[in-house]
């Protein structure tokens, strides 16, 4: 049972704290009182260092769309490993993965590879600035786009600081330069009229508007068609770049989420699934905009290096992973997602617990509230709500299922209805346990 102070995970955590700040390298994998350490994964299962096997419904924060150790991905990686892991030369593998991505997505004319979603977003913002000659960007309150400081503005605003009506730009980490804060315009997600009014007051100064079209930090609610259409039309009219951050949503369709909604951004950022389980990021978009990186005619307006950019191991794994993602594979995965959300709704009903499941395609998010969610402010959880969710999360772990601590879950290709049924049954048990715990402490 988790937590257990005598477990191997608890011991590793104590050891980790001696050499790593707070015991880790990644805030998102910390879980109080200690994180569960993984030993191995296979398909849709992950085994921890104490030998406990669980269904992996988070698959490294949605990155492993084929689960752990998919044979085709392993084969591609093993073949590359016999040839070398990285060179001070480009390799054909990066051309092949770029071709695969451009073939799928109409808005992709050129691609640039980096090592993480954070770097993809940073370079997309810098490309927009270099292309437009402007400094400011606009982003939505509460949305996560990785760890580049301009896009962290207002990432965790709360009722004490988010402002009465229009969102106040709030720095996320201590030491954020005032200049960074001044150059970020914050709009409310899905508020068509309010956001357009704010954008309009900075028209002519904005290099880009960045949006994740289904952000889990707004409860995994899709951006409305009207909101996306407004952003597309505003940016077109005012010479700003529209950036879709598809680091997570690229797993929602054959041509990413933009293919599902039929809106073409100028630039798109990706990560996670396109690396087949290896560190990756990429930005892609209009050739004219991407030419800011082009060194073929002298110093480009945006010089950009990176020792491991497009490293062939990642490229090989990514290509194998993407090739498996045919239109049929997406249809199956997304149908499984519909089934999972339906079964979760049933679990809430049977447990007689107010709650809901949001999401689309192979993504879902659990909430312990049935109030309508449309924006960051709706989805924001206070301390008491977070504590309730932490109990549900712990119950799920003890019933054999891993999701994120905020309730995000992702379905992978090795899963079938059997795994979804196991997940739904673990959710039902966990909800009943939560109900009992709450009654007992009332
Ligand atoms: C929408 C979005 N953008 C950017 C990132 C950053 O990607 P990475 O963790 O690879 O730096 C993430 C990570 O989860 C993300 O969800």
Image (cartoon, grey):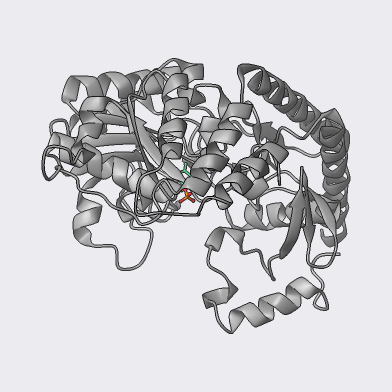
Q: Residue at x 17, y 35 (%)?
A: 131
Of all residues, the one furthest to the front in this rendering is 83
Q: Quadrant of residue 170?
A: bottom left
Q: Position of residue 225 (x, y in %)?
A: 44, 18
Does 349 appear above or below 3? above
Q: What is the quadrant of the C terminus in the image?
A: bottom right
Q: Judge by depth and name the residue closer to the eye, 30 or 106.
A: 106
Q: Residue at x 76, y 30 (%)?
A: 340
Q: Judge by depth and name the residue closer to the eye, 381 or 271.
A: 271
Of all residues, the one furthest to the top in this rendering is 262
Q: What is the quadrant of the N terminus in the image?
A: bottom right
Does 69 appear above or below 251? below
**338 sits left or right of 231 in the view:** right
The answer to whether any part of residue 343 appears in the image is yes
Q: Position of residue 97 (x, y in %)?
A: 46, 33
The answer to whether any part of residue 369 appears in the image is no
Q: Position of residue 238 (x, y in %)?
A: 17, 24
Q: Residue at x 19, y 19 (%)?
A: 237
Q: Residue at x 82, y 42 (%)?
A: 427
Q: Position of residue 297 (x, y in %)?
A: 12, 37
Does 220 appear above or below 402? above
- Total numbered labels placed on residues in the image: 0
Q: Judge by depth and name the residue closer to the eye, 336 or 209.
A: 336
């Amino acid at each position: 049972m988790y937590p257990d102070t005598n477990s191997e995970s608890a011991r590793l955590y104590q050891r980790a704290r001696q050499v790593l700040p707070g015991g880790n390298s990644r805030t998102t994998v910390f879980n109080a009182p200690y994180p569960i350490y993984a030993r191995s994964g296979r398909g849709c299962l992950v085994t921890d260092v104490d030998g406990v096997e669980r269904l992996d419904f988070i698959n490294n924060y949605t990155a492993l769309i084929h689960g752990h150790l998919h044979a085709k991905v392993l084969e591609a990686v093993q073949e590359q490993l016999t040839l070398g892991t990285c060179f001070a030369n480009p390799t054909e593998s990066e051309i092949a993965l770029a071709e695969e991505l451009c073939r799928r997505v109409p808005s992709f004319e050129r691609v640039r590879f980096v090592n993480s979603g954070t770097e993809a977003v940073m370079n997309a913002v810098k490309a927009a600035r270099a292309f437009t000659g402007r400094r400011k960007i606009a982003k939505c309150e509460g949305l996560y786009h990785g760890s580049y400081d301009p896009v962290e503005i207002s990432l965790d605003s709360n009722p004490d600081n988010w402002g009465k009506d229009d969102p106040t730009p709030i720095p996320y980490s201590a030491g954020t330069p005032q200049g960074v804060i001044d150059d970020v315009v914050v709009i409310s997600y899905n508020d068509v009229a309010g956001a357009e009014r704010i954008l309009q007051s900075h028209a002519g100064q904005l290099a880009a508007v960045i949006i994740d079209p289904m952000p889990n930090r707004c409860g995994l609610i899709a951006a409305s068609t009207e909101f996306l259409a407004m952003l597309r039309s505003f940016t077109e009219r005012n010479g700003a770049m529209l950036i879709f951050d598809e680091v997570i949503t690229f797993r929602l369709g054959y041509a990413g989420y933009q293919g599902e909604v039929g809106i073409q951004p100028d630039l798109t950022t990706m990560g996670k699934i396109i690396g087949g389980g290896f560190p990756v990021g990429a930005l892609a978009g209009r050739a004219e905009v991407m030419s800011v990186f082009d060194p073929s005619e002298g110093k480009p307006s945006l010089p950009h290096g990176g020792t491991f950019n497009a490293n062939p191991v990642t490229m090989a794994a990514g290509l194998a992973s993407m090739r498996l993602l045919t239109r049929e594979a997406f249809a199956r995965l997304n149908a499984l997602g519909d089934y999972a959300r339906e079964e979760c709704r049933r679990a809430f009903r049977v447990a007689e617990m107010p709650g809901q499941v949001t999401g689309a395609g192979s993504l879902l998010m659990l909430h312990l509230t049935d109030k309508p969610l449309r924006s960051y402010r709706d989805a924001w959880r206070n301390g008491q709500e977070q504590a309730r969710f932490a109990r549900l999360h712990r119950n799920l772990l003890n019933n054999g299922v891993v999701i994120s601590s905020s309730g995000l879950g992702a379905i992978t290709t090795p899963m079938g209805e059997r795994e979804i049924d196991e997940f739904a049954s673990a959710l039902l048990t966990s909800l009943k346990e939560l109900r009992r715990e709450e009654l007992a402490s009332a």
